[in-house]
Image: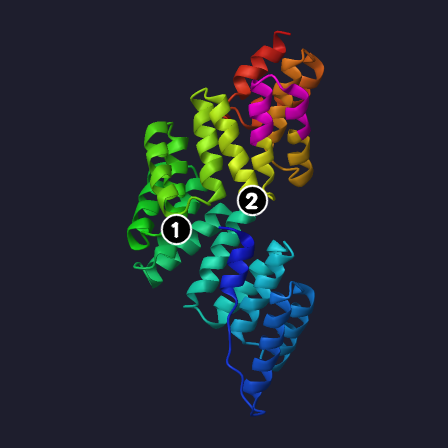
């Protein structure tokens, strides 16, 4: 789920009042924080939320909204801490548990996300978000059958949500069920043709089927719809490499690394580039480590062997 959308949808709102009770005072600080967050000023928002918490140290909504501000600043540990405080003071706080689970995933804490997903199922098994978080956590844990089942359940509860169909298509792609994945993407496209991740995944499927021109067309649609995703540029760079446009491809791969320096697929693609130009030393500098740490990553073993043979 897009982080900015998560934040904007997640903010807790409070109606204003003319009284000067403690509830009204802390409520005004909450509203001021919300205004700053909507103005894209999360640091000032945090200050106002802290003022509300000073008045009431158990103010769950203030902790929750403060967490949303930390997320806007990509401060994941701080967001998790505030969400945990919100849940401490309101154990049935569904949205706080949901957002904490998503943030655990962003922070690489997959088993903790799984625990929050189980907690949501107990709280409300008829809410699509409960099953969505189950699906995401199981995907990260590579339990693909369980993940697909959860996404299917979420989709049955929220049939107009195209993202849930894209999630199902992603799992089918991981399972190398390309035709089934493409069918699912076509359903998602009928609901929302402007979903960038749909076109990115379509490009990956077409690349897997050796349709390089189709893959390039699809990834360019994804980039046109959302220019801030590092892995879109990385994928386009990979497709350009296989189309023989090596330097143009490398430029995009490097751009992707500048945007996200922790994506192993980008370093795989740099290794592939160096194999293609016959630079054994540089190729192995990337592919040696990947072959050890990500032995099952697509193309790694193939190009590691090619690099060794140079």
Residue 243 versus residue 58 in the image, above or below: above
Secondary structure under tag 2 reads loop
Q: Residue 126 at x, y = what percent?
A: 30, 59
Left or right for 113, reference 185: right
Q: Earlier in the sequence, mark 2 or mark 1?
A: 1
275 left or right of 132? right
Residue occupying the point 64% across, 39% down: 260
Residue 173 lies, with reference to residue 132, above or below; the image says above
Label 1: which residue?
A: 132
Measuring 39% from the left and 51% from the top, which residue is drawn there?
132
In-front residue for pair 48/241: 241
Which structural element holds mark 1? helix
Residue 39: numbered disc: none
Q: Are marks 2 and 1 in contact (CB under 8 Å)?
A: no
Q: In front of the other: label 2 or label 1? A: 2
| Principal secondary structure, stretch drawn in magenta | helix
Q: Based on the displayed image, in which of its 4 quarters is residue 240 positioned? A: top right
Q: Quadrant of the C terminus?
A: top right
Mark number displayed over residue 226: 2
Q: Residue 285: which quarter of the image?
A: top right
Residue drawn where x is 42% and y is 44% of the image:
193
Q: Is residue 177 visible?
A: no
Residue at the (51%, 26%) spot, across then down = 297
Residue 271 drawn at (x, y percent)? 63, 21
- Establish if 38 lies above or below 287: below
Residue 48: percent from left, percent from top: 65, 74
| Magenta run includes residue 240 | yes
Residues drawn in magenta: 235-251
Q: Is residue 65 above or below residue 150?
A: below
């Amino acid at each position: 789920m897009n982080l900015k959308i998560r934040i904007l949808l997640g903010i807790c709102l409070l109606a204003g009042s003319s009284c000067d009770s403690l509830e009204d005072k802390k409520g005004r600080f909450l509203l001021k924080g919300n205004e700053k967050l909507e103005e894209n000023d999360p640091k000032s928002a945090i200050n106002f939320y802290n003022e509300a918490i000073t008045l009431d140290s158990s103010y769950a909504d203030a902790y929750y909204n403060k967490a949303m501000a930390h997320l806007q600043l990509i401060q994941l540990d701080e967001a998790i801490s505030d969400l945990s405080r919100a849940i401490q003071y309101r154990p049935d706080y569904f949205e706080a548990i949901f957002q904490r689970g998503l943030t655990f995933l962003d922070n690489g804490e997959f088993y903790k996300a799984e625990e929050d997903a189980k907690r949501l199922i107990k709280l409300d098994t008829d809410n699509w978000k409960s099953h969505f978080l189950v699906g995401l956590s199981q995907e990260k844990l590579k339990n693909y059958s369980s993940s697909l089942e959860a996404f299917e359940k979420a989709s049955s509860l929220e049939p107009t949500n195209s993202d849930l169909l894209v999630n199902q298509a992603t799992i089918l792609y991981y399972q190398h069920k390309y035709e089934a994945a493409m069918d699912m993407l076509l359903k998602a496209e009928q609901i929302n043709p402007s979903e960038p991740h749909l076109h990115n995944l379509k490009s990956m499927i077409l690349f897997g089927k050796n349709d390089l021109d189709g893959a390039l067309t699809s990834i360019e649609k994804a980039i046109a719809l959302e220019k801030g995703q590092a892995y879109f540029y990385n994928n386009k760079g990979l497709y350009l490499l296989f189309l023989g446009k090596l330097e143009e491809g490398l430029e995009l791969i490097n751009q992707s690394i500048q945007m996200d320096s922790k994506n192993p697929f980008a370093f795989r693609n740099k290794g592939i580039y160096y194999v293609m130009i016959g630079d054994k030393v540089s190729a192995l500098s990337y592919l040696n480590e990947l072959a050890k740490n990500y032995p099952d990553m697509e193309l790694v073993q193939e190009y590691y062997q090619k690099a060794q043979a140079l």
